Image (cartoon, rainbow, N blue to C red):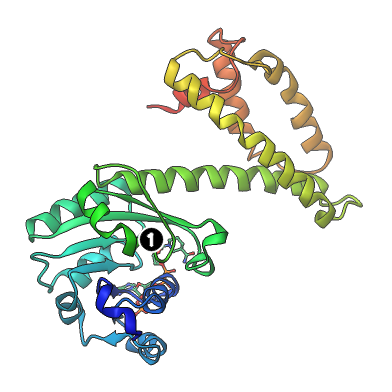
Amino acid sequence: MTPHTVDKTPVTLLGLGAMGTALARTWLAAGHPTTVWNRTPARAEALAAEGARRADGPAAAVEASTLVVVCLLDDVSVGEVLAGTDLAGKDVVNLTTSTPAQARTRAAWAADRGARYLDGGIMAVPPMIGVPETGGYVLYSGPRDVFDHHRDTLAVPAGATYVGEDPGFAALHDVALLSAMYGMHAGSAHAFALLRREAVDPVDFAPLLAGWLTAMAQSVHQTAAQLRDGDYTEGVVSNLAMQVAGTPTFLDTARQQGVSPELLTPYFELMRRRLTEGKADEGLTGLVDLLLR
Ligand code: FVH
């Protein structure tokens, strides 16, 4: 424990997996009195040696601090771990990855037990925790006053970004961002597959790919403005008619390179459907609406 701990909010952390351990270490290093508990006790040993207080069980851990951070595998494990604890008067911050529905249900569950509740979505991997220059951050949602009250403490491991009072919003933003990431990975997998049997070093191609994805990522701002304003033709430079006309080139190239088009075809099918609705002058924004059921 450092000499500064009297000024610092005590933190309890339930769950010392890769992420929970990284989180706890930053609060310890910043001088917060830190109480930890993990189902497998051995995972708490290193942190105890660094100054963490080890609780015998979840109930004792919750009792130790008003601010109770939970970072477990999933929502089921959160329910199991918190089941026998007294949450009255506690501020529970749940950083376990959840669906928006799970987060909303968990917020109501915590309120029934007398706790205030923030949900969080971690936009970082463990090595990014406590390293601000990596750009990792955590999305938070729930009561604004609870977030503001704990903002400084929550900002210790990574940037703290508040996204709204609805407790499901952190999870919703988290899943939306990660879904976009998987789209990027899907496109990258297809691109690397096209080159795979050619005399092209993937390491030489990678900077071209990263640069192109970075440049194209800026288009999300136009998409967002069009969605907000309802005019999907505003500022379009590459219209849907032109883009659909180009799709055979992509499919022919995939065939010639012996690459499955399975990652591209669902998206191309949406483009074709939107064009048949008479939206030739739009860009790709209209595909958002096609996805809504
Ligand atoms: N690690 C990552 O890259 C991602 C980054 C984005 C956010 N995720 C989410 O963070 C949550 C925790 O992830 P983690 O990396 O710490 O996960 P693990 O290393 O697998 O540790 C899991 C902890 O959960 C405990 N646990 C699991 N089931 C139970 C249970 N039924 N009862 C009590 N504890 C349970 C487990 O305990 P033990 O196996 O050591 O005994 C670990 O403490 C997660 O939601 C990610 O999606 C991480």
Near-viewer residue (128 or 105): 128
Residue 86 image point, x, y percent: 9, 71
Q: Is residue 283 left or right of residue 243?
A: left
Q: Which residue is tagged 1?
A: 155
Q: Residue at x 34, y 43 (%)?
A: 163
Q: Find the residue positioned furthest to the right.
A: 199
Q: Residue at x 23, y 47 (%)?
A: 144
Near-viewer residue (31 or 200): 31
Q: Is residue 110 left or right of residue 284?
A: left
Q: Is residue 262 above or below residue 276?
A: below
Q: Is residue 82 left or right of residue 197?
A: left
Near-viewer residue (147 or 195): 147
Near-viewer residue (167 or 153): 153
Residue 53 image point, x, y percent: 28, 86
Residue 34 visible, this angle = no
Q: Is residue 142 above or below residue 252?
A: below
Q: Quadrant of ligand 1?
A: bottom left
The quadrant in which residue 191 appears is: top right
Residue 176 image point, x, y percent: 44, 42
Instruction: Look at the numbered disc 1 and give the secondary structure of its residue.
Output: loop
Q: Residue at x 75, y 49 (%)?
A: 192
Q: What kind of residue is marked 1?
A: Ala
Q: In which quadrant will I find the C terminus?
A: top left
